[in-house]
Image: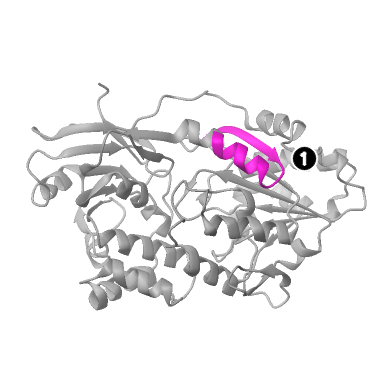
Amino acid sequence: MKKPFIIQRGRKNYFELPSGWELLCFADFNDQKAGQDVKDLARKSLNNPIQSPLIKDCLSPSDSIAVIIEDLTRASPKRLVLEVLLKELESAHIARENIAIIIALGTHREMSSKELAATFGQKLLEQYEFINHDCHAPDLAPAGRLFTGRAVKINRRVHEAAFKIGIGSIFPHPMNGFGGGGKIIFPGVADFDSIVEHHLAFTFHEGTGFGKIEGNLFHDQVCSMAEAAGLNFIINSVLDQKDQVFDIVSGHPVHAHMAGIEKSRKIITQRFPKKSDLTIITSFPYTEGPQIVKPLTPASMVTKEGGCIILAADCTGGLPDAFVESFEKFHSEHGTDLLGSVHEHFEQKRLIMEGAVDFNMALGFTLAIQGSFKIILVSEDIPRETGERMGFIYAGNLQEAFELSAEICPPNPEVHIIPSGGVILPVIS
């Protein structure tokens, strides 16, 4: 058997389990095709769209184009894909001034001019109009209604464009089943209030879940709103366990997305023989702020209720004070029933903290999992005091985590190791 490792600081950190511990599953993937040329994949994808005509056959030179693209919280090769698309639009005789590139921030913070230049290149910024979506903008345009009845508004530049193209990425998502597809429109360029209502209404719905599509009302609503808003075409990168591009799918917003999901399932599904007493997982590839807790969801799927999860997290962006304080306050007020209290907040459509919806989702999921599992946080970036204020058991390194877990796990625990926690779809055999 391979010597186990976890990915920390982007590198493999090899280690040995304590004597007597039984390794059930080391969830390392077989390496996929190496050295994929992203631009070549993008060109091939655009030349073979799924259930859609070629982009150039859909356009006339006078058309206004909205290219809606992911922000920094997603690891897709945005610039390379965008460059290929812009060449395609140029060949269709679309003038640069007819093209607007909208960053699909949802409720995330806007990208700074420095971040935009680093991500897309100064040359593109000078040639094209880049717009940070503002979910609070006063000129958002009506686009449809949620299943709950609330009106949804979207970015006006997107609304007014004759042709709308979404650039995103496909990987497991805790609520939508998988990222990509219609999410680039909703919540990507929607208004704050409708995003809040949708997320609070359907995040803990019985059909919602990691890797789930069928019967998932969260996902159904996303697709419905993307159709209502007139999303015409998507270009989605399928990401592998190393957070690199495995393939690219283009075409119809629903059919191309489903084709990409099937590709994703084939390369990132990992079977586990049964649930473990203890699971060791990393935040990789997530390193920015609240995103680092996302791998707790797949870890909870393969760990016995009441068991232990060791989360090894790189956190280069730091954690906002308000985010940490919200953990501390919720534990203080609801520590005896974290799971029930989280569900109560969502059922009553109450945010746990003011501000970005993704912060509330990270809070909600983490607090709910803390209510059912013992979680040890290992991090060189997060101070001990911060981790403990958030309700975690804190360890400075893996060895310390192993020593702490001996106090809360049964003797000789059965263990899973997941070296790449952010891009995996776990299945219990």
In percent of the image, x 33 and y 51: which residue is there? 296
- Above or below residue 385? Residue 235 is above
Residue 256 is a magenta residue: yes
Q: Amino acid at mark 1?
A: Ser
Depth order, front residue of 265/5? 265
In the rendered structure, the answer to whether residue 50 lies left or right of residue 221 reads right
View extreme (front): residue: 215
Q: How is the image coloured?
A: one colour
Quarter of the picture containing the C terminus is top left
Where residue 412 appears, as percent x and y from the top left, is 9, 38
Magenta span covers which residues? 244-262
Depth order, front residue of 382/37? 37
In percent of the image, x 29 and y 66: which residue is there? 339
User: Total of numbered circles in the picture?
Assistant: 1
Q: Quarter-wise, where is residue 255 in the image? A: top right
Q: Quarter-wise, where is residue 90 in the image? A: top right
Callout 1: 10 Å neighbours few (<14), some, many (20+)? some
Residue designated by label 1: 52
Residue 3 is a magenta residue: no
Depth order, front residue of 159/301? 301
In the rendered structure, the answer to whether residue 363 lies left or right of residue 305 reads right
In percent of the image, x 58 and y 72: which residue is there? 148
Where residue 188 appears, as percent x and y from the top left, is 61, 60
Q: Is residue 383 visible?
A: yes
Q: Is residue 14 visible?
A: no
Q: Secondary structure at mark 1?
A: loop
Where residue 38 appears, as percent x and y from the top left, is 63, 32
Quarter of the picture containing the N terminus is top left
View extreme (top): residue: 1
Where residue 133 appears, as percent x and y from the top left, is 65, 64
In the rendered structure, the answer to whether residue 135 lies left or right of residue 418 reads right
